[in-house]
Image: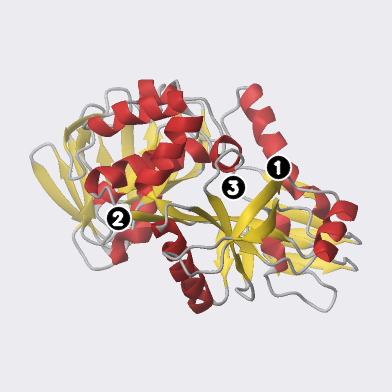
Amino acid sequence: VYIISNEQYKFQIQHQVAEFAVPASNIILEPQGKNTAPAVGLAAAYIFKRDPEAVMIVLPADHRINHPERLTTVLKKAIESAADNKLVTIGIKPSSAHTGYGYVKIKSPVTSHQSPAKAYKVDKFVEKPDKKTAEKYIKAKTYFWNSGMFVWKAGVILDEIKAHLPELFRTLAIISQAKELDSRIWAKISPISIDYGILEKSKRVVVIPAKDLGWSDLGSWSAFSAICDKDKNGNVLQADCVDFDSKDVSIFGKSRLIATIGLKDTVIVDTDDALLVCDKSRTEDVKKVVDHIKFAKRSEHFTHKTVKRPWGSYTVINHGNGFKVKLVQIDPHKRLSLQRHLKRSEHWVVVEGEAKVTIDRDVYFRGPNQSIYVPQKGIHRLENATNNNLKIVEVQCGQYLEEDDIERISDDFQRK
């Protein structure tokens, strides 16, 4: 199993896959998001280097499959076609005239002695249609949802990248030979989707239809709402909320009380970072909000209140002139780096578990309702040596309180 994602999700991914023993070398991290063609190409380059005959199954992380055993059957058929040097896309038989998915139109079946799997040549790929067009697609019975799930040989997809995206291929060749992914080289890559860059141009693309998978693409809040349990008024209420007379609303939140009155077809998402309120038909436009935040040079799209670290996580509770307050959670048998801060001091109060604290040459133990002071420039380390979670409230004091005020002396996770 290989996982490719953005570098900012590194520690979150490590936490999620820890129980599956995925090797660290199989987690490929992009310095910047460049859309699907560079991401798939990068994974293919690494896989090809290990096994030139390897067949790749490309699966997006935001899909839900209710019947995985049926997907397994479809993928086995797809592997047969991939062995015949085909680029296989899994087409989902549409159950409704959905306007949130791209479609692929099939034509004649593919005949091959090597691959007996029932695959079809592609007539064309089409973007997300309007409602009337989607209804025509359903009636035609030759259109399938383009699932974004693909199967092909690593070498074959690289050949197609070389043919249709030669500049990307040259860059991937350089990257695959280096020991580490150079962020400066990666930054020069032009973003492009695998559909537009390769699949719409290649002569090797085939579709293998799939039905009754219980497939959902959870790429929007409206799509996620569709799979959630609802009350008698069609409301999804996954929050501490009070509602009167609303219908078909979806409310997601973790902390504050949310009160709604007389709403209809609305999505509300309340997080520590931001609040989203939108018409259910416009949830795809969240991308516009993110683009605006980037353009305005705000930080909400990359700086979060809760941040994952290899040892656990921290949540910023409050901050102001000269202070910052965090809730820090350290996983069992994990510890922070041995470090010091040149511009701040810290006060730690244990609220759960037992802390092992190193300050300069001394070691202290602190339990719930006990505290300790870490002076500015003091060399220190916080450790959870127990089988239980450790939580502390950290109060930072100083005129500069950013995360880059850190000098690591030693670190279990090889961070600099």
Residue 327 visible, this angle: no
Q: Is residue 375 left or right of residue 159?
A: left
Q: Taking 203 as reference, is 143 above or below it?
A: below
Q: Is residue 255 left or right of residue 39?
A: right
- Asked which quadrant contains residue 376, the reply is top left
* Residue 80 at x, y percent in the picture: 42, 65
Q: Is residue 223 left or right of residue 120?
A: right
Q: In the rendered structure, which amino acid carries the disc numbered 2?
A: Gln
Q: In the rendered structure, which amino acid carries the disc numbered 1?
A: Val
The crowding category of the residue bearing disc 3, from other C-alpha atoms within 10 Å (few below 14, some 14 to 19, many at least 20), is some
Mark 2 lies on residue: 370
Q: Taking 130 as reference, is 233 above or below it?
A: below
Does the residue at mark 3 contact the one at mark 2 (Cβ under 8 Å)?
no
Q: Earlier in the sequence, mark 3 or mark 2?
A: 3
Q: Nearer the viewer, residue 29 or 60?
A: 60
In the picture, the quarter occupied by the C terminus is: top left
* Residue 293 at x, y percent in the picture: 65, 29
* Residue 314 at x, y percent in the picture: 41, 47
Residue 357 visible, this angle: yes
Q: Nearer the viewer, residue 197 or 393?
A: 197
Mark 1 lies on residue: 286
Question: What residue is rendered at 35% in x and 56% in y?
Answer: 15
Does the residue at mark 1 contact the one at mark 3 (Cβ under 8 Å)?
no
Mark 3 lies on residue: 272
